[in-house]
Structures are given as structure tokens and as C-alpha cells.
């Protein structure tokens, strides 16, 4: 069995993933696979299905890279996995890091920073108990606003439309960033508890 390269996939894993993507495209509609040998329109269906698959995998790639960067991995490591140089990876996928907004002098808003993929949920849980809830976020920071109630926050990796709908049905509110392409979706929900004293 082929050993996986550092942080990468084995040859068998790559093959299985390629086959799964191809199978998803072929199975999008019953006549897609069956009609390829006899129905000219089936080929157009494959073009449409392949376009959607390419768009989704491209979006997942960008989100995965953002997640790796947020977790502290270098452009050199990311470039190696992409088969390109560090500079090429940064030029293609890097976005200028958003500067955290200034804290509100009236103390109704403030910035939690620096944060990363490993400590941000603990920071949000602590702040949420003290009545702070996220109103915006960016690279390595969250902008929070004070309230008299406690809040809970949740982070989801690339949620499906069904999962997003279920979150809303359960009372969660999607937090939409102003200018940050994040690999995660963040949600918040107020609790029926008074905020604990203190700032966090």
C-alpha cells in the first residue's frame, strides 16, 4: 500500500476521490449515464453537471486553503500540496488580511483578537456567557456586541442547504461577514439567561 505524503493523500485515496466525483456527476439524473451511448442531449447534461461539480470543488478548495491558513499552516506547505510554489499559492489564493475594526469607545462593541481555528470557539463561549455576541468576523478576529443576555455560538464546516435551513428552524442566526471568505459558517443564538458579570 502506498504511504501518504506528508499532509497529503495516498494514491488509493486520490483514486477513490476521483471516482466518487465522477460517480456523482454521472448519477445526477438517471438518463445521464444511460443516455451517453445513444442520446446526444445526455452529453450536454454531463457538461452542466460537471460545471456545477467544478464550481463546488473550486469553492471547497478555497475554503480548505483558508482553513489551513487560519490553523497556522504556511503558504509553503499549502503550495506543496497544490503542486505549485509558495509564491504562486499566495498570489492565487491569498487575500489581503482584513484589519480588525476599532473597538467601540462606548464599549458596546469590541474586537476579540488574535483568534485561530483552535481557540476561537472557547473565546466565543466565554464572551457569550458575558453577553457578547458576534456581529462580524474576519481573519484572526471576531467583532462582538454587548447585550443583557447570554449567547451561544456554533461553527460549521461548509454546511449544506438542508443543514442551514435546520439551523434557522432551531433559532440560530447566520452571521454574515462583510469581507472575509471563511471556510466555516458561524451561527449565534440568544439564551434565556442573564449575562454574567465581567468582560471575559
Image: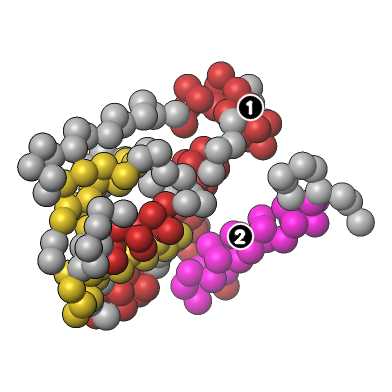
Q: Residue at x 17, y 53 (%)?
A: 145
Task: Determine whether 115 is above or below 16 in the image.
Answer: above
Q: Quadrant of residue 192?
A: bottom left
Q: Position of residue 200 (x, y in %)?
A: 31, 54
Looking at the image, which is closer to me, 199 or 68? Answer: 199
Specify whether 122 is left or right of 79.
Answer: left
Query: Would you say residue 181 is visible in this rendering?
Result: no
Task: Determine whether 53 is above or below 190 in the image.
Answer: above
Q: CA distance from mark 2 to mark 1?
A: 30 Å
* Nearest to N terminus: mark 2 or mark 1: 2
- What kind of secondary structure does the magenta stretch mostly adopt? helix
The extreme top residue here reads 87
Q: Position of residue 112 (x, y in %)?
A: 31, 44
Location of mark 1 (residue) = 76
Q: Position of residue 108 (x, y in %)?
A: 11, 49
Q: Residue at x 13, y 61 (%)?
A: 147
Is 56 colored magenta in this rendering? no
Task: Determine whether 188 is above or below 89 in the image.
Answer: below
Q: Quadrant of residue 127?
A: bottom left
Specify few, some or many for label 1: CA neighbours under 10 Å numbering under 14, 14-19, or 20 or more: some
Q: Which residues are magenta?
A: 10-33
Looking at the image, which is closer to me, 52 or 144? Answer: 144
Is 13 colored magenta in this rendering? yes
- Element on which disc 1 rests: helix
Q: Classify the position of the N terminus by image quarter.
A: bottom right
Q: Residue at x 36, y 63 (%)?
A: 125
Q: Position of residue 96 (x, y in %)?
A: 36, 26
Query: Would you say residue 90 is visible in this rendering?
Result: yes
Q: Residue at x 55, y 38 (%)?
A: 72
Location of mark 2 (residue) = 22
Amino acid at each position: 500500500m502506498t504511504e501518504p505524503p506528508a499532509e497529503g493523500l495516498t494514491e488509493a485515496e486520490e483514486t477513490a476521490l476521483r471516482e466518487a466525483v465522477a460517480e456523482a456527476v454521472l448519477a445526477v439524473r438517471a438518463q445521464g449515464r444511460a443516455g451517453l451511448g445513444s442520446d446526444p442531449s445526455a452529453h450536454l447534461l454531463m457538461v452542466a453537471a460537471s460545471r456545477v461539480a467544478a464550481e463546488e470543488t473550486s469553492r471547497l478548495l478555497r475554503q480548505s486553503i483558508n482553513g489551513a491558513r487560519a490553523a497556522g499552516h504556511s503558504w509553503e506547505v499549502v503550495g506543496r500540496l497544490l503542486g505549485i510554489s509558495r509564491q504562486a499559492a499566495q498570489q492565487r489564493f491569498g487575500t489581503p488580511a482584513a484589519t480588525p475594526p476599532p473597538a467601540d469607545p462606548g464599549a458596546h462593541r469590541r474586537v476579540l483578537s488574535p483568534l485561530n481555528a483552535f481557540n476561537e470557539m472557547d473565546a466565543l463561549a466565554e464572551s457569550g456567557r458575558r453577553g457578547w455576541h458576534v456581529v462580524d468576523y474576519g481573519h484572526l478576529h471576531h467583532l462582538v456586541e454587548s447585550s443583557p443576555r447570554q449567547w451561544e455560538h456554533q461553527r460549521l464546516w461548509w454546511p449544506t442547504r438542508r443543514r442551514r435551513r435546520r439551523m434557522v428552524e432551531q433559532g440560530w442566526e447566520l452571521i454574515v461577514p462583510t469581507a472575509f471568505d471563511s471556510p466555516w459558517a458561524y451561527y449565534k443564538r440568544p439564551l434565556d439567561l442573564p449575562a454574567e458579570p465581567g468582560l471575559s
